[in-house]
Image (cartoon, rainbow, N blue to C red):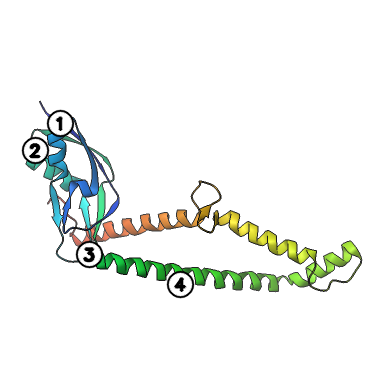
Amino acid sequence: MKNFVYIEMEDSVQVREKSVRISDVASVYAADPAVCAGVKNIVLYKFEKKEKQVISLLWLTASVQAKFPDCLVIPHGESDCIVEWKDSAAQKGFDTLLGKLKVLVVSLICLFGGAFSIMAFHNDISITNIFSQFYEFVTGNSSGGFTLLEVSYSLGLLIGILVFYNHVGKKKITSEPTPIEVSMRNYERDMDEAIIKRRDREGSKVDVQ
């Protein structure tokens, strides 16, 4: 009687050890605890250098069948998993510092780029003249350039940006993903697909030959 082994593969993971085991790239379930533990411990690939490698579901299935021929693998999830090796705690610290620097640089670019875009747009439509004319039309008095209209507009612009990005400091306004999170997820998916396609063309994917 065959043992059923259910495997759900991730799309991308990071590992700290050179040896990549099934437990690193997939969730495993089997009715027999010994079989489940044995499957999780199967080594799929060993890194020799820092790189990103693509491990296919076919290779994972073949590895399980080679060690447990009486098992029937029932796969779920992704057909390929991108594995990246992070080799040490020092590297982790470097990556953390590098990540913070990247966040700082991107934040500054967004801040000054956004400010420049808003100013350029306001200058293009002559918003100062529009506010002055509207203020004079409503109140009958000349605008000094700093009225309740400008203050309300500035506050509304700030609130609109906060609501759009769904963030106030480190806290979210709602539980929904922010536009940046959605964009980053789409970017990661596109990058993963590009890496998998390139490995396919190069023939360097860990797959059944």
- Seen at 83% across and 65% down, the residue is 134
Image quadrant where one finds the N terminus = top left
Relative to residue 187, is residue 138 drawn left or right? right
Between disc 2 and disc 4, whose residue precedes? 2
Q: How far is mark 1 from mark 2, CA to CA?
A: 12 Å
What residue does disc 3 label? 88
- 106 or 125: nearer the eye? 106
Q: Secondary structure at mark 4?
A: helix
What crowding class fits label 2: few (fewer than 14 Cα within 10 Å), some (14-19), or many (20 or more)? Answer: some
Q: Indicate the position of residue 149 as horizontal and vertical percent values.
A: 78, 64
Q: For the residue marked with disc 2, what is the amino acid?
A: Phe
Q: Which residue is mark 1?
A: 32
Q: Nearer the viewer, mark 4 or mark 3?
A: 3
Residue under numbered circle 2: 68
Q: Amino acid at mark 1?
A: Asp
Q: State which tag comes first along the sequence, 3 or 1.
A: 1
Q: Which residue is mark 4?
A: 105
Name the residue type under label 3.
Ser
* Neighbourhood count class around disc 3 (C-alpha, 10 Å): few under 14, some 14–19, many 20 upward: few
Q: Nearer the viewer, mark 1 or mark 2?
A: 1
Q: In terms of sequence position, does the residue under pointer 4 or pointer 1 come before the other?
A: 1
Front-lying residue, 158 or 126: 158
Q: Secondary structure at mark 3?
A: loop
Instruction: State the separation of the CA atoms marked 2 and 4.
Output: 51 Å
Residue at position x 57%, y 69% in the image:
114
- The disc, 2 or 3, on the residue closer to the chain's N-terminal end is 2
The answer to whether 173 appears left or right of 11 in the picture is right
Eyeballing the image, is 81 above or below 105?
above
What is the spatial separation of the Cα atoms under label 3 and label 1, in whole angstroms? 35 Å
Please name whichever residue, 33 or 153, is drawn nearer the observer in this view of the structure: 33
